[in-house]
Amino acid sequence: MTEDRHRTFSGIDLEPVYGPEDLGGFDPARDLGEPGAYPMTRGVYPTMYRDKLWTMRQFAGFGSPAQTNARYRYLLDHGQTGLSVAFDLPTLMGRDSDDGFSRGEVGRCGVAVDSAGDMDTLFDGIPLGDVTTSMTINGPAPILFAFYLAAAERQGVAWRDLGGTLQTDIFKEYIAQKEWLFPPRPHLRLIGDLMAFCAAEVPRFHPISVSGYHIREAGSTAVQELAFTLADGLAYVELGIRRGLDVDAFAPRLSFFFNAHIDLFEEVAKYRAARRIWARWLRDRYGARDERSWRLRFHAQTAGCSLTAEQPDNNVVRTTVEALAAVLGGAQSLHTNSLDEVLALPTDRAVRIALRTQQVIAFETGVPDVIDPLGGSYLVESLTDRVEAEAEALIAELEAMGDGSVLDGVLAGVETGFQQARIADAAFEEQRRFDAGELVRVGVTRFVDDDALPLDLLEIPIATETAKVEDLAAHRSARDAVTADAALDALEVAAGAPDVNLIEPLLVCARAGCTEGEIVRRLQGVFGTFDEIVRL
């Protein structure tokens, strides 16, 4: 083992043993406090899992809305406590299933949703007032949310009874995942409209889940994931304030989505530092007085980038360690990846194993019985302080780029490729460490064998796409074309008026049967498109 190996996965040097001398200036009352109290280091609720376990929310979606509806019913029958919708690539990119660019991708990596009618089918027989729904959708999030609200209306469910989360975080799309529809500033207008609308009309729904997950999957370090994610969250806080909203009216409905990676103690430290930074900024910088605004609540998903196609059974072990890190770090909800996800969408068997992993941690390990069980550990407290300090330094760089505004700094960074370049450098360094043998991936870089048994994989036949395209054609034929065109015309006019909240015109389009692609094309006619600047 090389000396360089004694570092965290993200490259923080580790001492052979930790003691009081590694916590210089550490004040338990100031830096730890009590669970549910400022600075929230130990958890956002006083009793954490002793009273209520985290939500076990498996990410699911494939093929047609009817096929995914069947998977949801299966998961709910096997003990899942919340739904999480995975959309296919065309839906994420704002394209209908019959778009030429959608060919070969319909239903492949998630469910294809073209209209509010598809949303009806997706949740058929699932009362939307009785479940919480997380939707991993960003660029077209306001459009898909309008479809969801229309589906709730047709179920007879009041908007005020709807609970769940939209991802909506467009900054991480520019930084990491690359699924945007418009330039940054029009996207921010739509997000501001959504924040205001939810605050007034859908108070139990969280309009933004600020996502670090995809930043980490793109190759960032844990510190970069934390810093860039929190900076994005702080930028949305400033956006809400600029829209004239009281910070305490919308900040409690912001939530976060983090990656649960393989380095157990670094990940726990990351989550604890995240809560402390968020509480401090919201209270001291933005003047939030409601303690709910100080609470950084987060969903975690185990790391897709840690999974291997080689010896895929090992992925069950990786996922277990990563899920344990999320629970020890105080997650409010958790998705555990399936062992076969590096190869294809997961099978029912693989999904069941992933869900059972959470249930074993919850009901057999005793871990949920103690709040912040690693609190006070010399190693964990030292790592928490180190991760916090390095993340704050990165946030300060962005703040300086915005002349004191985090929002303007994040925008400047996105438009000049700052965050993207830092992540690319980190990804290069991680690969260098693997190539040099400083990092080990079991079954890939060491302990390799060639006798792995083949897996049964889930395949999405081309017939699924053909049927979806035919369904879309039937939908267009059945709707009132005059009403749909009028709704699209009204949306286009509203988009050209900067002071109009666009959620209501989007709802009119949803009720009229307009498709996602039709809506996006009308908005792009007003807002334009965006080409990324790549820094070399």
Image (cartoon, grey):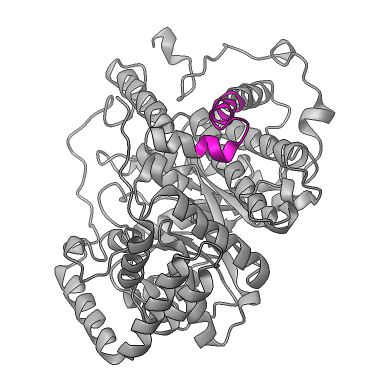
Residue in the foreground of this view, choosing between 313 and 496: 496
Count of numbered tags: 0
Is residue 56 or residue 479 the one in the foreground? 479
| Residue 126 in sight here | no
Which residue is found at the position 31% from the left and 72% from the top? 518
Residue 109 in the image: state x and y as whole percent.
29, 58
- Percent position of residue 102, x then y: 21, 63
Is residue 358 visible in the rendered structure shown here? yes
Image quadrant where one finds the N terminus: top left
Residue bounds of the magenta highlight = 392-410
Rendered position, 225 above or below 339: above
* 398 versus 454 height, above or below: above
Q: Is residue 32 magenta?
A: no
Which percent across, then down, holds residue 244?
Answer: 68, 56
For image coordinates 33% across by 67% down, the residue present is 111
Residue 290 placement (x, y as % from top left)? 80, 52
Magenta: main secondary structure equals helix
Quadrant for the C terminus in the image: top left
Is residue 21 placed above or below 421 in the rendered structure? Answer: above
